[in-house]
Image (cartoon, rainbow, N blue to C red):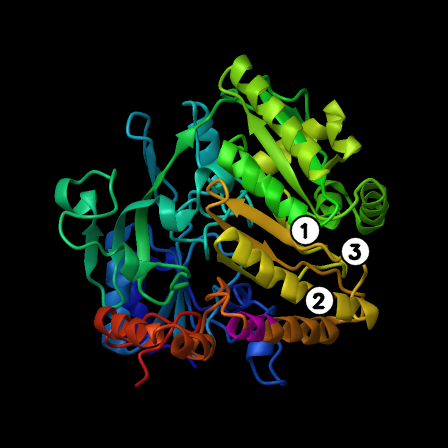
Amino acid sequence: MALARDFYRALEDLLGPENISEDPVVTESYSFPIRKAMMPETVTYMPRFEAITLPGNTKEVQAIVKLCNKHKVQYKASSTGWLYCDPTGPNCIKLDLRRMNRILEINEKSMYAAVEPYVIGAQLQAECMKRGLICNLAGAGANCSALPLAAHAGLGHLSQSGSYSERNLLAVEWVTGDGEIISFGSLGASGEWFCGDGPGPSLRGIIRGNTMPLGGLGVFTKAAVKVYHWAGPATFPVEGVCPQYKPSHIPAGFMIRYLSFPNIDALVEAAQRVGESEIGFELMGFNAAMMASNIATDNDEDLVYLKQFTDQIQGPGFLLIMAGNSPRDLEYKKRTLEKIIEETGARSLKDVEDPEIGAGFMWRFIRVTGSIRETSRATGFGGGTVGGTDVFPLMTKYILHTSDLKQDLIDRKMIMDDGIYPFIQSIEHFHTGHGEILIRYNPAGPDHIMNVQGMLSREANKTALRGRFGVPHHTYSDVLHDMYGPETCNYHLLLRKIKKNFDPNGASEASLYITAKE
């Protein structure tokens, strides 16, 4: 449906005609085909936005939001956008925040960075490294927003030592669903970014928890994120192009290993001991397929690497990067790791020990450059994920239950046999964890892929409920919150009250959050 002319002209007057478009060529380019499973069978693409807007600052965001409330038009904001950015119905406009791309501050003393939504992770990380600091990047890739509220969960490769967005979020500037500007934490009290709570009651639990509003609770226009000590060089010397980056060497004080284990219990014990001794800079539970996809340039090469790596491993494994703050510190960490390897029966993947290959992996995993290839091979060997987080051992049990389903799909020739081992990630030195099942589709077409994804998602939800494994990160939409809420202290009723209070007109499109339905 076309937007009312007075509403469109008001947006033009606000932004300038160069920063708004309703041209179908433009709006179609924002339409995403991946979530057909949520729509009727006749629908291939999600509905188009009625118009695309490009606000340049918070005042313009606020003005757009107020206009939408006045004219009863929905809006949805996103920054870099990987998934979860499209509407599910008509009468919705897009707020593309790409013009809001400034690093506002990097505070070396208080160890935080304040950013606008379109600052990408690679950009902030590079600037932090120059100052002896580093930030956690979303595991979806370095091209994702560095805003700690932009990612779905904010899990990343550095989460072993650098936590994740829920824990790293500091002060925030927020345009609520009805257009109010709220600055909370220290920003509201002193104009500084160092704290996300107080004075007074904190709003951090309102705007995010285990899952994000995903565009359904207004617009987050600025936020600060905690940053961490970086023991490496100010610049990471590298040549070549993606994915064949060729760092000249592994930086002094760093070591990388891929360890496989005789069984999952040995892996969990090793991950726990790495966490307890705090020797891990990164610990990511990549399987051989993900390692292969990270380095391969095409699908044929991918399969060659997969066999090469699979032949060298004995079971489930993880990728470990250690960083020493001094030669003695690294030596201690090496001795500790040697003892863990000996006592858990771990085996090192020899290719990763090669200085040239290891340097390439280290660059890609620290800079998070390979995620799109690890989960979405271009011509059919794609990846589908289901997952959950909780304390690490409970999360592991949950993922092992869903691994049985993957094995069944392999036996039925519905997906490729890339090894059954799940992706398991340790967070905050084993205090919590994240797990996923990644699959390689047989190239049987998009309908086959959607059927497999739907089957995995349904079974993952059933498993989480039956096993009391907690609410997974993939819980979004009324359907899923209504499924989990009654089993989890009726939290969905509180979410609906939050939505109603901060977005009384339902202007902020909330198909991937929760609506205020009675």
* Alpha carbons under labels 1 and 3: distance apart: 17 Å
Does 175 sit left or right of 323 as displayed? left
* Residue type pointed to by label 1: Ile
> How packed is label 2: few (under 14 Cα within 10 Å), some, or many (20 or more)?
few
Q: In this figure, which residue is indicated by the disc labeled 2? A: 404
Q: Which residue is mark 3?
A: 418
Name the residue nearer the viewer: 1 or 412: 412
Q: Which residues are magenta?
A: 460-466
Mark 2 or mark 3, which is nearer to you? Answer: 2
Q: Is residue 129 magenta?
A: no
Magenta-highlighted stretch: main secondary structure?
helix
Q: Is residue 379 visible?
A: yes
Q: How many marks?
A: 3
Dot 3 amino acid type: Asp
Residue 407: x and y in percent read 76, 66
Choose the circle earlier in sequence order: 2 or 3. Answer: 2
> Callout 2, which amino acid?
Asp
Q: Is residue 369 visible?
A: no
Q: Which residue is mark 1?
A: 264
In the drawing, does residue 477 fall left or right of residue 517?
Answer: right
In space, the residues marked 1 and 2 are separated at their CA atoms by 14 Å
